[in-house]
Amino acid sequence: MAVAEARTPRRRHGSMALADLLLREASAERADAAGGERPGVAAGQAARARKGEDYALLKQGCERHPGASFSAFAMFDGHNGAAAAVYAKERLLANVLGCVPAHLTRDEWLAALPRALVAGFVKTDKDFQTRAHSSGTTVTLVIIDGSVVTAASVGDSRCVLEAEGSIYYLSADHRFDASGEEVGRVTECGGEVGRLNIVGGAEIGPLRCWPGGLCLSRSIGDQDVGEFIIPVPFVKQIKLSSAGGRLIISSDGVWDALTAEMAFSCARGLPPEAAADQIVKEAVDAKGLRDDTTCIVIDIIPPEKPKSTIHSRKKARNGFSLLKNIFIRKRTSDTLSRADTERTSEPDLVEEVFEDGCPSLLRWLDSEYPVRNMFKLFVCAICQVELESGQGISIHEGLSKPGKVCPWDGPFLCHSCQEKKEAMEGKRPSRVGQASSDQGQESS
């Protein structure tokens, strides 16, 4: 797991007053915007409901502190009721921001964001499960700060980007059918994964986790399935070129009917809201309204382009410096002109700053994590409660890493978050397993 060095500067603890530090940071970010370095953001959404369990979040002009703004967009596709989706929409973003140390510089904030996203997702899941609801939800949350896009996802609500004629996938599908690794993780933690058996022993449908029959390995909620259905998200952070791009975030009602290429193609040239409406219409026309079908379209607009329409192919820019991490995706499937064909040998430049889908909280919270020094030591790394002396449990408790870490090294968890971590790892009975055991004892 690596973060580009430019994203992890160490803070120097000098004598500068906090007010002066904030003023300097705000002035710098306003200067960036005035200098044409921060693109604009335009967004729209559309939906067709069947069960009423899809929820969308569109928030522009959010502020970390005065002068430091960002935008946030999210898709919540609920199942077994809407309670988890509603709760996550109301609480998730605040929980994520609560896990980011205050008054970071912009580079520090962007470097700290992946770990804060993981902690915020886990806290939201843990808090929701105390409400004794059995519903669950997928989540795809996208935070846009200038040209940097950070996406975190559990479940199968995808986020895709089109930039300079190429398509990039910023989320991961957590369906059992899509990942043998996730099947192995859940079975090792005590879950049972298989298809639905019908009369005669035939198996039908997608792979599901039993009890409960959920076809997702990661989500928020789903207390009735087991703690091995985890809320730890796949996180990806990229930096766009000055050409901008278009994002589509949709529930599976869209992606079960359309490929990413089809979605971008059918809405090309339309402003965000009309584009979202067209994508939903195409999906419903293709498969019928079998599920809630919701779409968010976001255009990240270069400052010199006043319109909110992002076209799929841009003129190659001379002298654009090569970035540290460049990744290439296949071009869209529409017919290329001769000029476009001549350019296909040139790489599309989108900087991949960070990517990790590891399910282990230990890995995310480990003191070896590159931005470890940005986080407070004597607070719970998940729920952010302050820990008195002797209250916290090191994430290294019970591990043997001679010469590397000790049980008294942080980060620390409170007792309830430590129990949550152990249940997710299959080290203690989940609520479902404990309930089944209790029922068995009562019946005997």
Image (cartoon, helix red, strand yellow):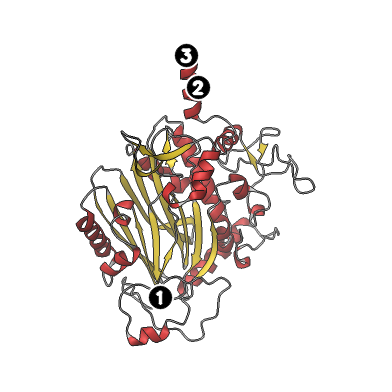
Q: Which residue is mark 3?
A: 442
Residue type indicated by callout 1: Glu
Q: Going 48% across and 78% down the picture, which residue do you hit?
A: 347
Instruction: Specify whether 193 is left or right of 278.
Output: right
Residue type indicated by callout 2: Ser
Cα distance in 3D space between marks 1 and 3: 63 Å
Q: Secondary structure at mark 1?
A: loop
Is residue 309 positioned above or below 128 on the image? below
Q: Which residue is mark 1?
A: 164
Front-lying residue, 131 or 215: 215
Cα distance in 3D space between marks 1 and 2: 56 Å
Q: Quadrant of the N terminus?
A: bottom right
Instruction: Specify whether 434 is left or right of 270.
Output: right
Q: Position of residue 51 (x, y in %)?
A: 25, 42
Q: Position of residue 415 (x, y in %)?
A: 61, 32
Residue type indicated by callout 3: Glu
Q: Which of disc 3 and disc 1 is earlier in sequence? A: 1
